[in-house]
Image (spheres, helix red, strand yellow):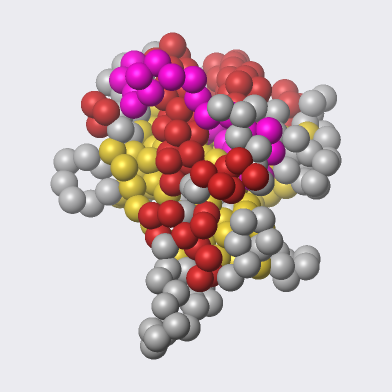
């Protein structure tokens, strides 16, 4: 997967990016022998670095399709449900998520002092954790991982006051979606929004999904815009080397897409774009 829209130019870089969460993940054919008792044994593989755990409902297997107008499909599993388990590191900045058909590694911002460690570190955490998981499956004769899809997501929070004050200012953050503010128009400024679109990667290796939402922080009630960029897909080559390359291309599309969709002024003044 070498095709990209970059023409060899370096990726945009920001001193103060609004990213609050990044994850890499893989969807694979359900490992039917991976039963609930194995979750505790698996935790022992991670426990030194990820000493806390939580149990959650499993994620549904949403996958990209490229053979018709439908963009996603939901596959039905013919095996009993297994919980999704979080293995949590430190104060919660890093999480490994495991379920019967999914493995993910997250970085998330827990307070304002946390700095995004950059994608290479997030990807390394994914590979290190996935290797432990693969070894565990092999040691217990549970089967191997057969990849169906890869996924990378960046979630950004843009609070009120950082380049915008009301939703009528949306064009200052996202110039493609400017709201006309003529004094003689009938409609007032909007009070909510939820916008979603997608872009096809070269060689149908995946799609970039972009979602922009208006929300409020749970603890303070302060309004914010949430910009979520996700690439899902998989290439013809399912080797580890090809998967690593896929994640790099997905990251490039997300970072360049972020720069393409957001305004120059907020990039320079708020997020301190360096290049």
The residue lying toward the viewer, choosing from 4 and 101, is: 4
Q: Main secondary structure of the magenta part?
A: loop
Quarter of the figure with the C terminus:
top right
Rendered residue at 65%/37% (across/down)? 272
Rendered residue at 39%/46% (across/down)? 209
Residue 247, position in %: x, y? Answer: 46, 25
Rendered residue at 56%/47% (across/down)? 265
Number of marks drawn: 0
The residue lying toward the viewer, choosing from 216 and 147, is: 216
Rendered residue at 42%/63% (across/down)? 178
Query: Which corner quadrant of the image does residue 235 belong to?
Result: top left
Horizontally, residue 236 falls left or right of residue 221, namely left
Horizontally, residue 35 falls left or right of residue 230, namely right
The stretch drawn in magenta includes residue 152: no
For residue 222, say whether it is visible: yes
Residue 183, position in %: x, y? Answer: 45, 83
Magenta range is 1-27
The stretch drawn in magenta includes residue 21: yes
Where is 228 relative to 12, above or below? below
Query: Which corner quadrant of the image does residue 114 belong to?
Result: top right
Query: Which corner quadrant of the image does residue 211 belong to?
Result: bottom left
Residue 232, position in %: x, y? Answer: 39, 37
Where is 203 relative to 100, above or below? above
């Amino acid at each position: 997967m070498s095709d990209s829209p970059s023409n060899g130019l370096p990726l945009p870089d920001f001193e103060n990016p609004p990213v609050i969460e990044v994850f890499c993940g893989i969807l694979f054919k359900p490992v039917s022998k991976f039963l609930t008792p194995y979750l505790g044994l698996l935790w022992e593989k991670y426990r030194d670095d990820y000493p806390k755990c939580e149990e959650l409902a499993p994620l549904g297997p949403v996958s990209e399709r490229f053979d018709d107008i439908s963009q996603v499909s939901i596959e039905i599993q013919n095996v009993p449900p297994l919980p999704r388990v979080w293995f949590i590191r430190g104060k919660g900045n890093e999480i490994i998520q495991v379920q019967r058909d999914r493995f993910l590694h997250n970085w998330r911002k827990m307070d304002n002092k946390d700095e995004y460690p950059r994608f290479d570190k997030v990807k390394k955490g994914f590979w290190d954790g996935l290797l432990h998981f693969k070894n565990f499956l092999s040691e217990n004769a549970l089967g191997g991982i057969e990849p169906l899809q890869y996924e990378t997501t960046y979630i950004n929070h843009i609070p009120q006051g950082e380049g915008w004050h009301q939703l009528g200012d949306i064009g200052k953050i996202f110039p493609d979606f400017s709201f006309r503010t003529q004094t003689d128009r009938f409609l007032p400024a909007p009070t909510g929004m939820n916008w979603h679109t997608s872009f096809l990667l070269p060689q149908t290796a995946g799609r970039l999904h972009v979602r922009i939402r208006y929300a409020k922080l749970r603890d303070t009630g302060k309004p914010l815009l949430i910009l979520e960029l996700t690439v899902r897909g998989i290439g013809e080559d399912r080797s580890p080397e090809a998967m690593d390359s896929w994640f790099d291309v997905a990251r490039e599309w997300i970072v360049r897409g972020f720069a393409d969709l957001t305004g120059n002024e907020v990039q320079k003044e708020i997020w301190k774009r360096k290049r």
